[in-house]
DNA sequence: AATCCACACAACCGCCTTGTT
DNA sequence: CAACAAGGCGGTTGTGTGGAT
């Protein structure tokens, strides 16, 4: 609590800390039921709860609020977290806006316990480009594959970097490159941005996503620095191999080989043909 | 059966932003 | 415009739990 009034209240009342009891939860729910959300410090003083306003707010938003979803994150939700984090970094509350019923705290915990764990095991920084590539070219495609297996078998796009036209169930999470886009034409570039429809395929009710609000700094991906999927597989695969007994290695290399074979088949032997 | 350890998640802390006076 | 209060956010810590030894 940062306010002087709040500090005074803290001095006057011996505040409770730690886990909430059922009785406290009931009191909080009842108070909010009668008076609504907000005015958390007032709530803390008037509800009879010996908690700070902040503590009440957190307990309500992260746990007691009726629309808070419990249980494991779905594949689609995991996919969205990886995707949105790759764009926005640790903007948990912003990411949470795209996952109805999930809280920023929950997403943050997911990232720390699941995603950062992988980076630790691989002994790389979770913000490093090599780890980001691993997420993007191994983890995310694998999630897509798992999603496709649990869906009504749509054809699997072996590489989600590339759009699959005319298949609504496929999470096409990139904006299709313009016609002028080509690796042989490095002067072109395009924003890497999920389309509203692709996000809708993944996660239901989404706020409208503007084409240009993907990167806060307005940056774009330059074709000159945008590796082809095969190149990524190769480079990340090499790296993974060099990691020795890393968690991703055999599985990842198998996946890379499989993905490469599927690309060949899917795109008729040439990705950008 | 007891202990240890890793993990998941709830909760707290400090800083920053926003709104109000 | 400054001061203050309140809320919001991201980082960090504490604790319960389940699996391994």
Image: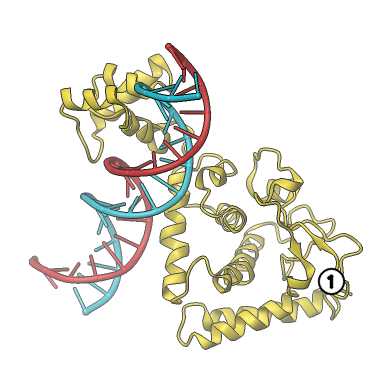
Chain colours: A yellow, B red, C cyan
**Is residue A71 at all visible to an observer of this figure?**
no
Indicate the chain on which mark 1 is placed: A
Residue A22 x %, y %: 25, 32
Residue A204, given in percent of the width and then of the height, sits at 65, 42
SS of the residue at dot 1?
loop
Residue A150, image x and y in percent?
62, 59
Q: How many marks?
A: 1
**Which quarter of the image is occupied by the C terminus of chain A?**
bottom right
Q: Nearer the viewer, residue A91 or A258?
A: A91
Task: Identify the residue shown where x is 41% and y is 38%.
Answer: A62
Q: Nearer the viewer, residue A96 or A210?
A: A210
> Mark 1 sits on what residue?
A186
Whether B3 is drawn above or below A48: the answer is below
Q: Is residue A190 left or right of residue A50?
A: right
Image quadrant assignment for residue A40: top left
Characterize the local packing of mark 1: few (<14), some (14-19) or many (20 or more) Cα atoms within 10 angstroms.
few
Q: Is residue A91 left or right of residue A262?
A: left
- Image point (61%, 71%), residue name: A133
Q: Please state the horizontal and vertical placement of residue A50, each as a whole percent of the image.
A: 22, 26
User: Hey, which quadrant is residue A18 in on the image?
Assistant: top left
Query: In the rendered view, does A11 fall on the left or right side of C17?
Result: left
Q: Nearer the viewer, residue A163 or A180?
A: A180
């Amino acid at each position: 609590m940062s306010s002087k009034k709040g500090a005074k209240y803290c001095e006057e009342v011996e505040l409770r800390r730690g886990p909430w009891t059922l009785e406290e939860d009931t009191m909080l729910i009842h108070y909010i039921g009668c008076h609504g959300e907000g005015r958390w410090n007032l709530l803390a003083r008037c509800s009879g709860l010996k908690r700070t306003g902040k503590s009440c707010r957190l307990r309500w938003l992260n746990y007691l609020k009726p629309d808070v979803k419990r249980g494991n994150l779905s594949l689609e939700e995991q996919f969205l977290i990886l995707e949105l984090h790759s764009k926005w970094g640790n903007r948990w509350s912003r990411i949470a806006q795209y996952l109805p019923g999930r809280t920023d705290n929950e997403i943050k915990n997911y990232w720390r316990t699941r995603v950062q764990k992988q980076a630790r095991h691989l002994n790389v920084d979770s913000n490093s480009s090599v780890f980001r590539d691993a997420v993007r070219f191994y983890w995310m495609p694998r999630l897509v594959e798992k999603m496709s297996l649990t869906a009504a078998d749509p054809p699997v796009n072996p590489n989600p970097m590339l759009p699959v036209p005319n298949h609504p169930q496929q999470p096409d999470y990139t904006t299709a490159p313009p016609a002028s886009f080509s690796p042989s034409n490095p002067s072109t570039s395009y924003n890497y941005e999920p389309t509203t429809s692709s996000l809708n395929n993944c996660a239901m009710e989404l706020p409208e996503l503007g084409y240009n609000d993907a990167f806060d700094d307005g940056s774009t991906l330059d074709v000159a620095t945008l590796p082809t999927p095969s190149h990524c597989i190769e480079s990340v695969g090499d790296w993974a191999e060099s990691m020795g007994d890393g968690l991703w290695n055999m599985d990842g290399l198998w996946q890379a080989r499989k993905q490469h074979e599927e690309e060949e088949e899917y795109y008729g032997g040439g990705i950008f043909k």
